[in-house]
Image: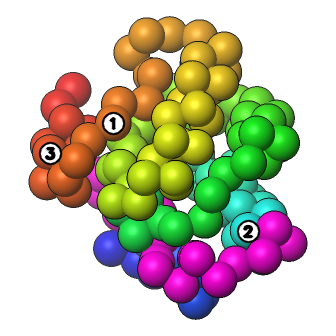
Amino acid sequence: MEKLYDSNYQEIIFSADQSLIEINWRLESEDMSLYDFRKEMLKLFRLLRKIAPKKILWNTKELKFILAPEVQTWINHKLGLIPQVQHSKAALINSEYIFTLVSLEQLLDEMENLYTSQDYKPKVFKSKDAAISWLSMD
């Protein structure tokens, strides 16, 4: 595993042999401003475009930033500009924080149009082990 990015808010690591990018949000995300969040996401989007991983693990278990509807729309727009993401198998580990959880569920509902194949629609998990197990299946 290679650490690609590390900040107060998230860590992004990559496993070349699994073609897996893992995004681990941190509890400090509660203190993020909208500017900070967008900056963090733009960094992630650049890495997704550059690496084009076959698998993405969004670990939002500790994410405490609430994704307002306009932020959800912005994320979907930006992801739509990265065709590689539409062909990546994606797993999301749910946040433990109810308001973040609800906003993530809304985001996933909006993402329905982004993924052209049922095979690539993100799946939601409660644990990292379950998510990794599913991502490892072909």
Q: Residues within 10 Å of mark 1 (few under 14, many from 20)?
A: some
Q: Residues within 10 Å of mark 2 (few under 14, many from 20)?
A: some
**Residue 45 image offset from top left, x and y in percent:** 71, 55
Left or right, 131 with reference to 69: left
Q: Look at mark 3 in the image and give the residue it sits on.
A: 130
> Which sits earlier in the primary sequence, circle 1 or circle 3?
1
Q: Which residues are magenta?
A: 15-36
Q: Residue at x 34, y 59 (%)?
A: 96
> Which sits earlier in the primary sequence, circle 3 or circle 2?
2
> Which sits earlier in the primary sequence, circle 1 or circle 2?
2
**Amino acid at dot 1:** Val
Inter-mark Cα distance, 1 to 2: 22 Å
Left or right, 35 with reference to 93: right
Which labelled disc corresponds to residue 124?
1
Query: Farthest residue toward the front?
Result: 98
Q: Look at mark 2 in the image and give the residue it sits on.
A: 37
